[in-house]
């Protein structure tokens, strides 16, 4: 929107702004700075007054080079063009704002008209409601009398309701007692079941421990049986060796007895050898008897351990058979 007029203060402000930006404060430049308002004659008069009072030396445009003058002219032309474009945009925006405000005023006037019509219709409705109120007041008196009779009936009904409430409370108390007894019974059953379950778990753990002990005992018995079998094999091997030695001794004795007739000439020398051989033979026989006794003892121990192993295996199988039954019962 254009200004209504200019004065010396506005021209001075525009001139100072141009000088601060390094622009020559010509009449056209000042007019552009003022928004293209004011006559050039008025601006020129104010500029002369300001220049006469400004003690600062003024730059002479004639001192500028042609290239700089051309650049300044182009910048001035561009500033004027951009200023005119901005002014056109501002004017267009102002026109749009004015049209929008006119539209808003029209809408507000229409709304005000509708509001007046609504108020008039409400006045008519208010008069009708006042008439209805008078009619309602007359009906209210009749209803008050009727309500008095209904209140008496309600009092009677309340007495009967209180009696019913007493009966209901009595039934609720009985129901509460029955529910408490049921809860107590359920708690007792639950506690008994938990005790049975704990006892069953304890028994199951004991059986598992016994089974583990039996398995360990079985492993120990198996180790002992293995060791005894090894000892038995060793003793049998030694017995075979002793038997072999005894057999060899017997063969040697037979050979010696066969050679006895031939060795009559060396009787003195052979008697000593004979006695020694007889002592060795006795020792070998004694050793054979000891080995035979040990072998018999080992065989008896082997039979006994085999029986204990069979009994332990059977007991372990029985325990294993009882565990699934107890698991099914839990």
Image (cartoon, grey):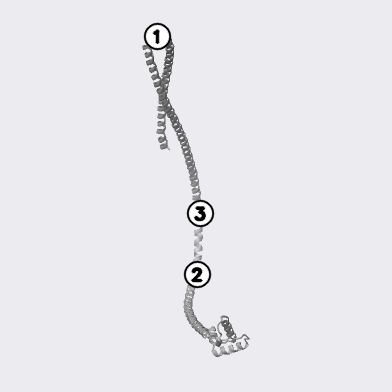
Vertical order, 314 against 144 (above or below): above
Precedes in sequence: disc 1 or disc 2: 2
The quarter of the rendered structure image containing the C terminus is top left
Residue 216 % position (x, y): 45, 31
Q: Secondary structure at mark 1?
A: helix
Q: As rendered, which of 306 and 127 lies closer to the eye?
A: 306
For disc 1, the neighbor class at 10 Å (few under 14, some 14 to 19, many from 20) is: few
The residue labelled by disc 3 is 158
One can see residue 5 in this view:
no
Residue 50 % position (x, y): 60, 87
Q: Which image quarter: residue 306?
A: top left
Q: As rendered, which of 144 and 191 lies closer to the eye?
A: 191
Q: Secondary structure at mark 2?
A: helix
From mark 2 to mark 3, how far is it between C-alphas? 33 Å
Vertical order, 25 against 133 (above or below): below
Vertical order, 91 against 310 (above or below): below
The residue labelled by disc 1 is 265
From mark 1 to mark 2, how far is it between C-alphas? 175 Å
Q: Secondary structure at mark 3?
A: helix
The residue labelled by disc 2 is 133
Q: Is residue 225 left or right of residue 12?
A: left
């Amino acid at each position: 929107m254009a200004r209504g007029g200019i004065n010396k203060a506005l021209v001075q402000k525009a001139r100072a702004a141009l000088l601060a930006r390094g622009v020559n404060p010509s009449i056209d430049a000042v007019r552009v700075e003022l928004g293209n308002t004011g006559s050039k004659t008025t601006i020129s008069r104010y500029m002369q007054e300001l220049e006469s009072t400004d003690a600062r030396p003024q730059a002479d445009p004639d001192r500028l080079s042609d290239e700089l003058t051309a650049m300044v002219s182009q910048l001035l032309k561009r500033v004027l063009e951009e200023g005119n474009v901005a002014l056109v945009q501002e004017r267009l925006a102002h026109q749009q704002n004015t049209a929008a405000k006119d539209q808003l005023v029209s809408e507000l006037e229409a709304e005000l008209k509708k509001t007046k019509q609504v108020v008039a219709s409400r006045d008519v409705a208010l008069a009708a409601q006042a008439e209805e109120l008078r009619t309602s007041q007359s009906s209210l008196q009749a209803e008050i009398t009727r309500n008095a009779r209904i209140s008496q009936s309600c009092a009677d009904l309340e007495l009967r309701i209180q009696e019913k409430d007493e009966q209901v409370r009595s039934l609720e108390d009985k129901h509460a007692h029955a529910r408490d007894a049921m809860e107590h019974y359920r708690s007792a059953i639950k506690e008994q079941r938990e005790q049975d379950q704990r006892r069953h778990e304890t028994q199951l753990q004991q059986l598992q421990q016994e089974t583990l002990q039996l398995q360990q005992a079985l492993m120990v018995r198996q180790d002992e049986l293995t060791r005894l079998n090894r000892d038995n094999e060793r003793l049998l091997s030694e017995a075979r060796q002793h038997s072999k030695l005894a057999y060899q001794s017997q063969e040697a004795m037979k050979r010696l007895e066969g050679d006895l007739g031939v060795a009559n000439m060396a009787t003195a020398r052979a008697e000593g050898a004979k006695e020694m051989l007889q002592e060795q033979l006795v020792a070998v026989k004694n050793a054979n008897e000891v080995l035979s006794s040990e072998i018999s003892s080992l065989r008896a121990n082997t039979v006994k351990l085999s029986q204990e192993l069979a009994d332990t295996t059977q007991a372990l199988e029985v325990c294993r058979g009882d565990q699934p039954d107890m698991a099914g019962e839990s």
